[in-house]
Amino acid sequence: MIYWQLLWSMIQIGLLSIGGGYVAIPLIQEQIVTLHGWLSLTEFTDIITIAEMTPGPIALNAATFVGMRMAGIPGALIATLGCILAPCIIVLLLAKLYYKYRNLNAIQYILSGLRPAVVAMIASAGVSIVMLAFFTKGVLPHTLHDVRFLSIGIFALGLFALKRWKVSPLLVMGGSGLIGLVVYLVIGVGGY
């Protein structure tokens, strides 16, 4: 039963992920956290973080991680297949149609209309992740106790390093992870 649920959920994610990996994040969250309850919101954020750090598309990496978590290696294979099946078919069909009709104004209008929706979906995913990273309950806090000041500090430091000194994103991720490890484990500061 879990295999069919994984396959169908990932087919839906793959089918509706128009615009790339970041657009898929709210769709993945809806399927994995809200609809099926396979992961908590914190676990989901951790998986997205890992999926962003590993090579390959975010949706595909997340599908593989979720499949592995829910049903081992067969689950990972089924979830991965489900995630790529619909996009492969759609891309082949669209490529054929695009090359045949690419000069039509209607095609250009459709693509222009899709761009703002994709930006909105990416922004929605970003806001969800920021809320979960900065606030203990994933929503705007009622007290200062619910604010993760260390997470905000690490974020600000990473953003500053990226913008001011053009540091490699890999170094920023590695440095942020090292700071988190030292502060949370070695020094023993809570907050996560």
Image (cartoon, grey):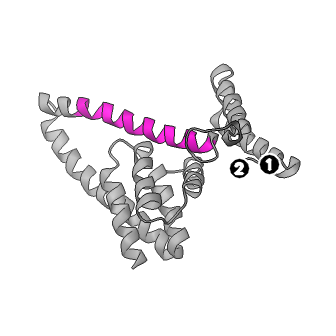
SS majority, magenta: helix
Residue 109 as seen in the image, left or right of residue 78: left
| Callout 1 amino acid | Tyr
Element class at badge 1: helix
Q: Outermost residue toward the top?
A: 164
Residue found 19% across the figure and 34% down from its top: 110
Q: Position of residue 161 (x, y in %)?
A: 69, 26
Q: Position of residue 124 (x, y in %)?
A: 43, 39
**Quadrant of the image occupied by residue 178:** top right
| Callout 2 amino acid | Tyr
Which residue in the structure is indicated by mark 2?
192
Front residue of 143 and 79: 143
- Asked if the residues shown at circle 2 and circle 1 are in contact, with their CB atoms under 8 angstroms apart, the answer is yes
| Stretch of the chain drawn in magenta | 111-133
> Are there few (<14), some (14-19), or many (20+) residues within 10 Å of tag 1?
some
Q: Outermost residue toward the front?
A: 142
Tally of numbered discs: 2
Residue found 43% across the figure and 46% down from its top: 21
Residue 82 lies in the magenta stretch? no
Residue 169 as seen in the image, left or right of residue 10: right
**Quadrant of the image occupied by residue 28:** bottom left
In the rendering, which numbered label is found on residue 70? none
The nearer-to-camera label among 2 and 1 is: 2
In the rendering, which numbered label is found on residue 184? 1
